[in-house]
């Protein structure tokens, strides 16, 4: 889960994979039937495939998992159907209470894609969350090639990106940071 690319279509997914993404998350704020149409072809990509906020679409698309926010429903269905379950957390309390296979924690820094998420979590809180839970933490929000290594150093297993998803330097920076983290 080192580079989790959040995309809204197949072309973006292909560009993110070419840049080194290991997880492709389809996120589009559209009705389920339209999301299913947009998701055609994702299952054939050589990456873990996650659908954002829509368990019904994840099941129809044969996704590996679904990523749900704090107020999204469907976790029980996702568990019953064997989907990988990702959850969002923007506070320590949300993180430690989450029932998830992985957590997307953030925003770490201010970002236009998370302008409604409140204050940034920051690296110190990210580190505290990573130490407190046993599932992988994926840092999200304002992450790019310049600061992704700091997220890994804080304990994150990877980073989730939108704008930086097609920057091949990001995957190299994350890989280098993961190697360095495992040496210490």
Image (cartoon, grey):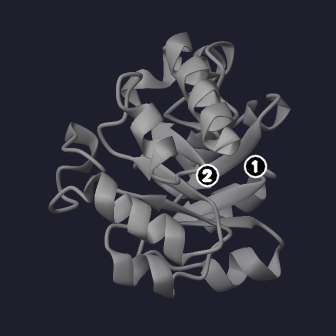
> Residue 61's mark?
1
In the rendering, at what x and y percent does residue 168 appear?
56, 12
Do the residues under discs 2 and 1 have CB atoms within 8 angstroms?
A: yes
Q: Quadrant of the N terminus?
A: top right
Where's residue 112, x and y in %? Answer: 20, 39
Residue on which the image places disc 2 = 51
Helix, strand or loop under label 2: strand
Q: Residue at x 53, y 51 (%)?
A: 156
Q: Give the image quarter of residue 65.
A: bottom right
Which corner quadrant of the image does residue 72 belong to?
bottom left
Please say if 66 is above or below 135.
above
- What's the distance in space between the residues labelled 2 and 1, CA to CA? 9 Å
Q: Nearer the viewer, residue 27 or 162?
A: 162
In the depicted view, which residue is nearer to us: 65 or 131?
131
Name the residue: 49% across, 34% down: 8
Q: Is residue 183 visible?
A: yes
| Up/down of 2 relative to 18, above or below | below
- Left or right: where 175 falls relative to 126: right
Q: Quadrant of the C terminus?
A: top right
Residue found 52% across the figure and 81% down from its top = 98
Along the polypeptide, which appears first: circle 2 or circle 1? 2
């Amino acid at each position: 889960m080192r580079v989790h690319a959040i995309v809204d279509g197949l072309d973006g997914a292909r560009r993110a994979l070419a840049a080194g993404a290991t997880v492709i998350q389809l996120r589009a704020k559209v009705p389920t039937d339209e999301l299913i149409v947009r998701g055609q072809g994702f299952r054939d990509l050589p990456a873990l495939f996650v659908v954002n906020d829509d368990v019904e679409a994840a099941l129809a698309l044969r996704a590996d998992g679904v990523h749900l926010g704090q107020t999204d429903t469907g976790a029980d269905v996702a568990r019953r159907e064997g989907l990988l379950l990702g959850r969002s957390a923007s506070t320590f309390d949300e993180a430690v209470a989450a029932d998830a296979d992985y957590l997307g924690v953030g925003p770490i820094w201010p970002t236009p894609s998370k302008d409604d998420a409140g204050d940034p979590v920051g690296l110190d809180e990210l580190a505290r969350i990573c130490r407190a839970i046993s599932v992988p933490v994926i840092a999200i929000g304002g992450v790019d090639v310049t600061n992704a290594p700091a997220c890994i150093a804080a304990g994150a297993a990877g980073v989730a990106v939108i704008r930086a998803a097609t920057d091949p330097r990001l995957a190299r920076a994350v890989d280098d940071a993961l190697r360095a983290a495992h040496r210490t």
